Image: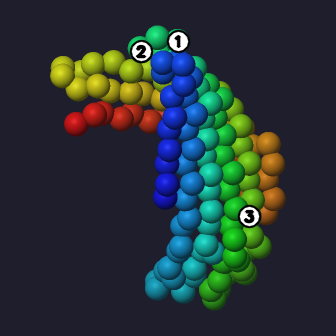
Amino acid sequence: NVAVTRLFDDGKYELSVNLGVMANTQNHATQYRTGTEFHADYLLGYHLNSAWAVGVTGSYYLQTDSDSGRGVGAVVDGEVATLGPAVMYTFKAGAREVSVSVKWLREIEANNHTPGDYLLVRSIMAV
């Protein structure tokens, strides 16, 4: 997994990209293995002030090889692309900085994948 964030114009604008590969192993209880997966996540953000930021976020997911195993038919490689809004709020909790982000990801493309939208809420505390 590799993640990079770049701030522009004295921190007003943000570009974040996260790339990753998940190499799955076999589940010995079910004799099933999910295929290798690739994902790319991105955010184009605008920091309104030191506390609030808004942006456009999205992701791309690709299963690069099929599932395998007995008892369940192999799943054909899946692919999903999402796009949606993001809001982040940062505040102090004592001496620590806490950020809470909310993202709504709407699937704009889905092949061989159960369709649906995602609501992600994440909290990060600096230690």
Q: Kindly identify the amino acid type of the residue bearing the numbered disc 2.
A: Ala
Q: Which mark is residue 48?
A: 1
Q: Kindly identify the amino acid type of the residue bearing the numbered disc 1.
A: Leu
Secondary element type, mark 3: loop
- Residue in the foreground of this view, choosing between 96 and 109: 96
- Quarter residue 126 falls in: top left
Residue at the image point whose x is 77% and y is 73% from the top = 76
Q: Are marks 1 and 2 in contact (CB under 8 Å)?
A: yes
Q: Let me know if residue 97 appears in the view.
A: yes
Image position of 67 (left or right of 13): right
Secondary element type, mark 2: loop
Does label 2 or label 3 sit earlier along the sequence? 2
Q: Identify the image's colour scheme: rainbow, by chain, secondary structure or one colour.
A: rainbow
- Residue in the foreground of this view, choosing between 43 and 116: 43
Q: Nearer the viewer, mark 2 or mark 3?
A: 2
Q: Which mark is residue 51?
A: 2
Residue at the image point whose x is 74% and y is 70% from the top = 77
Q: Kindly identify the amino acid type of the residue bearing the numbered disc 3.
A: Gly
Secondary element type, mark 1: loop
Q: Identify the residue position indicated by label 3 in the image.
A: 78
Residue at the image point whose x is 74% and y is 64% from the top = 78
| Residue at mark 2 to residue at mark 3: CA–CA distance | 38 Å
Residue 64 image offset from top left, x and y in percent: 69, 71
Residue 63 image offset from top left, x and y in percent: 68, 67
Which residue is at the far top?
Answer: 49
In the rendered view, would you say 36 is above or below 48? below
| Residue at mark 1 to residue at mark 3: CA–CA distance | 37 Å
